[in-house]
Image (cartoon, rainbow, N blue to C red):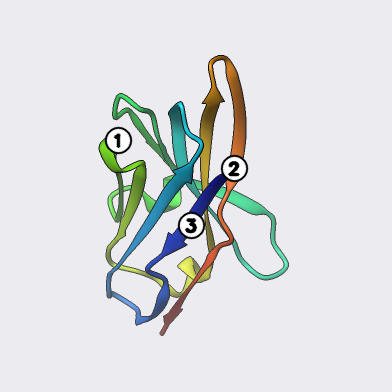
């Protein structure tokens, strides 16, 4: 069994900062790409940022320069530092991880989501 658990969401004023964390645990052989996605009410789930096991990153244009994704491979944890938050960043943020549970067996795992609300 594998669990992916997010934490760190909350309510913040526009211009403020939040840091999200996501930890994977359980029967893990290795972890590939980890990422953050978000879903606002009535909208589809969109990519925010992803990071490879080697540290290569990619960001949605809307968050470039404001958000930073990082990971600690020893802790199976990925982070999302969000600065200069805007009301349009309000959404449920989901963590995703590509996890190898046994040699050559990969699956995609989602966390339960954490709410981020930015007030104007």
Q: Is residue 56 above or below residue 23?
A: above
34 over 11 or under it: above or below: above
| Mark 3 vs mark 2: in front | 2
Determine whether 18 is above or below 37 in the image: below
Q: Residue at x 29, y 56 (%)?
A: 66
- Residue 109 image offset from top left, x and y in percent: 59, 42
Q: Position of residue 28 (x, y in %)?
A: 47, 33
Q: Earlier in the sequence, mark 2 or mark 1?
A: 2
Instruction: Tell me the tag on residue 50.
Output: none
Q: Residues within 10 Å of mark 2 (few under 14, many from 20)?
A: few
83 left or right, relative to 20: left
Q: Residue furthest right?
A: 42
Q: Quadrant of the C terminus?
A: bottom left
Q: CA distance from mark 2 to mark 1?
A: 19 Å
Contact (Cβ within 8 Å) of mark 1 with mark 3: no
Q: Of all residues shown, which one is farthest toward the top?
A: 104
Image x and y of residue 78, in percent:
35, 46
Residue depicted at 29% across the width and 29% down the height: 55
Q: Secondary structure at mark 2?
A: loop
Earlier in the chain: of badge 1 and badge 3, it is 3
- Per the image, the residue denoted by label 2 is 1
The image quadrant of residue 76 is top left
The Cα atoms of the two marked residues, 1 and 3, are separated by 15 Å
Q: Is residue 42 left or right of residue 15?
A: right
Tag 1's secondary structure?
helix
Give me the C-alpha separation between circle 3 and circle 2: 13 Å
- Name the foreground residue: 51 vs 84: 51
The residue that disc 3 covers is 5
Identify the residue at image location x=37%, y=68%: 8
* Closer to us: 73 or 94: 73
């Amino acid at each position: 069994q594998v669990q992916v658990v997010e934490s760190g969401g909350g309510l913040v004023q526009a211009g403020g900062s939040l840091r999200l964390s996501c930890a994977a645990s359980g029967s893990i052989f290795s972890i590939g790409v980890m990422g953050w996605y978000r879903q606002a009410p009535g909208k589809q789930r969109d990519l925010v940022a992803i990071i490879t096991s080697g540290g290569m990153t990619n960001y949605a244009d809307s968050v470039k320069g404001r958000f930073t994704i990082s990971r600690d491979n020893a802790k199976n944890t990925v982070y999302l530092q969000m600065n200069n938050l805007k009301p349009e960043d309000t959404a449920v943020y989901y963590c995703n991880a590509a996890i190898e549970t046994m040699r050559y067996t990969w699956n995609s795992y989602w966390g339960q989501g954490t709410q981020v609300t930015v007030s104007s």
